Image: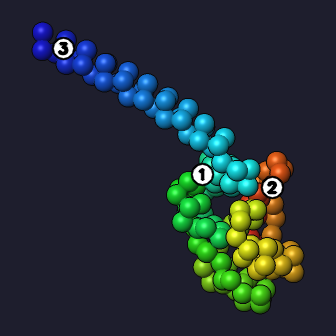
Amino acid sequence: MKVTILKSFIYILALFLLIISIKNIYDSKQALENYPPAWANYFKAAEWARDNLPEDAIIADRKGGLFGTVSRRKCVGFIATADSKALIRGLIHQKVQYVVVSYIPYGDIGRYLVPAINKYGQYFRVVYYNDIYPPTCILLFIVE
């Protein structure tokens, strides 16, 4: 009798947890749709990173903590400098493997990161690109 009650309780608890999980997934999808486009694309890129990049990947981003929380990957910032060579050296020093380029409203990306990528384009390969305006991309950073 006690075993039957315990089994019933476990089944009911499992069903309850499944319903809550489905609701949480639905709520997170709804929340993503309510962000401004630049932020929605940023979070989509982080989800892609979570699902596709190696667990030990090191990613550089302007908002490393935020991207890291969503992607569940180690994220670091980049050096905010107009010296593109120093920025690239900083990425190498931090053992960065991927770089996020987004249109979230922070001037550092366009002011420092994009010029460095343009100058040292031979070190970068696109691995993710979301072409919904404004786009977000993730670049593989290869220094040999």
Q: Which mark is residue 5?
A: 3
* Element type where label 1 sits in the image: helix
User: Within the image, what quadrant is residue 62 found in?
Assistant: bottom right
* Amino acid beneath label 2: Pro
Q: Pointers 3 and 2 in contact (CB under 8 A)?
A: no
- Left or right, residue 118 beside residue 77: right
Crowding at label 3, few (<14), some or many (≥20) Cα neighbours within 10 Å?
few
Q: Closest to the observer: 112 or 144?
A: 112
Crowding at label 2, few (<14), some or many (≥20) Cα neighbours within 10 Å?
some
Q: Residue at x 60, y 37 (%)?
A: 29
* Amino acid beneath label 1: Arg
Image coordinates of residue 5 in percent, x first then y, are 18, 14
Disc number lying in front (1 or 2)? 2
How is the protein colored in the picture? Answer: rainbow
Q: Is residue 62 visible?
A: yes
Q: Which mark is residue 50?
A: 1
* Mark positioned earlier in the residue sequence (3 or 2): 3
Q: Residue at x 72, y 76 (%)?
A: 108
Quadrant location of the C terminus in the rendered image: bottom right
